[in-house]
Image (cartoon, rainbow, N blue to C red):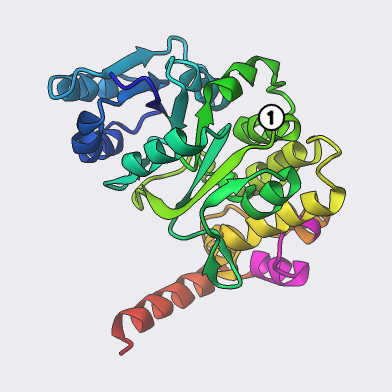
Amino acid sequence: MNDELSIAIPTFNRPEILYENLSFLLPDIKKYEIGVYISDDSTNNETEKLVEELSGKYSNIFYFKNNPPLGHDKNLLATLKLPSTNYVWLLGDSMTIKSGSIEKVLDVIKINSPSIIGVNSKNRIRVNGELFRSGLKKEQETIFINFGWHLTLTGATIYSKDVVQSVTSLDLVSCRNFPQIALIFNFLNESPSFFWIQNDLLVSQSKKKSYWSGNIIDVFIHDLSRVVYKLPEKYRLESKQQFMKSHSKKSKLFTIRNLVKMRLYGEIDSEIVLQNRNPLSTFTHVPYIIVLLISTLPKRIISLYLLGLQYFNKNKV
């Protein structure tokens, strides 16, 4: 089995998606003898059954069932600590790795041996419309400003053994829902060694339902800002504000279209928006008055709007 790199996957009630993603990975992980470690927080045995089937095709898949379940944050960190390899690619259960990506990562490890490796997904990281070029970065605030928002994605980061060993120093209460951000930037604060791979290496399942669905404001405004603002003072206040604004804009979670959908599904209303006026005004890129207006729209009007938009997109030349 490969001593340099392994893949670690925390999972929760997504057996079919996990099975599909692992099946796609099989040719590459077999080629490089990559160990795959799965930490299962599921409420049933469906994931275990499908993993057993895959283990018959590849013996270096290791399954761990959590009983009782650990919860999102503890399971993420527990999964990270399962392998003993020099590097661990922490992968969300709805993510898969494009063919040829493992070879690229192994080359980076061999030549550069960085503390942390970041990889692109759907070309999310751009500067003035161009991909941010691959290379070793050693200035922690530059790393934070340019890549921090993207590293909230579980799968975008590969951790060295030294980083994994620092997990025990984390305070999970202060980094709820984003322990990886605290882990990454507390470590880089002391030892900045980050290699960025500009290639689009990750694919996310479009049919997934994220654990934070229906709770976007709490997770991506309150929880994320709490983690970011508790990072060391070497990361300037202006940089932390830029991190939050970048995440709001570039992740597209708080676009007008997404806000309209949130209103349709009952995830926001005028009461919620009024209660969150200050954080919404501070941490999102959409003007607060527009957010408030959307929160008051009748759901019937929104349904008609989305149907019309869908019709237009299907029929435009």
Residue with the most extreme front position? 111
Q: In the rendering, at what x and y percent does residue 144 appear?
A: 69, 47
Q: In the rendering, at what x and y percent does residue 52 appear?
A: 19, 18
Q: Nearer the viewer, residue 121 or 177?
A: 121
Residue 43 visible in the shown view: no
- Residue 286 painted magenta: yes
Region of the chain picked out in magenta, as a range: 282-296
Residue 194 visible in the shown view: yes
Residue occupying the point 69% across, 66% down: 291
Hey, which quadrant is residue 218 in on the image? top right
Which quarter of the image is occupied by the C terminus?
bottom left
Q: Amino acid at mark 1?
A: Phe
Is 146 rendered above or below residue 212? below
Q: Nearer the viewer, residue 305 or 124?
A: 124
Is 146 rendered above or below residue 249? above
Residue labelled with disc 1? 187
The answer to whether residue 66 is left or right of residue 165 is left
Residue with the most extreme top position? 67
Residue occupying the point 36% across, 53% down: 206
Hey, which quadrant is residue 83 in on the image? top left
The answer to whether residue 91 is left or right of residue 33 is right
Hey, which quadrant is residue 77 in on the image? top right
Q: In the rendering, at what x and y percent does residue 13 appear?
A: 36, 29
What secondary structure is the stretch in magenta mostly built from?
helix
- Residue 256 painted magenta: no
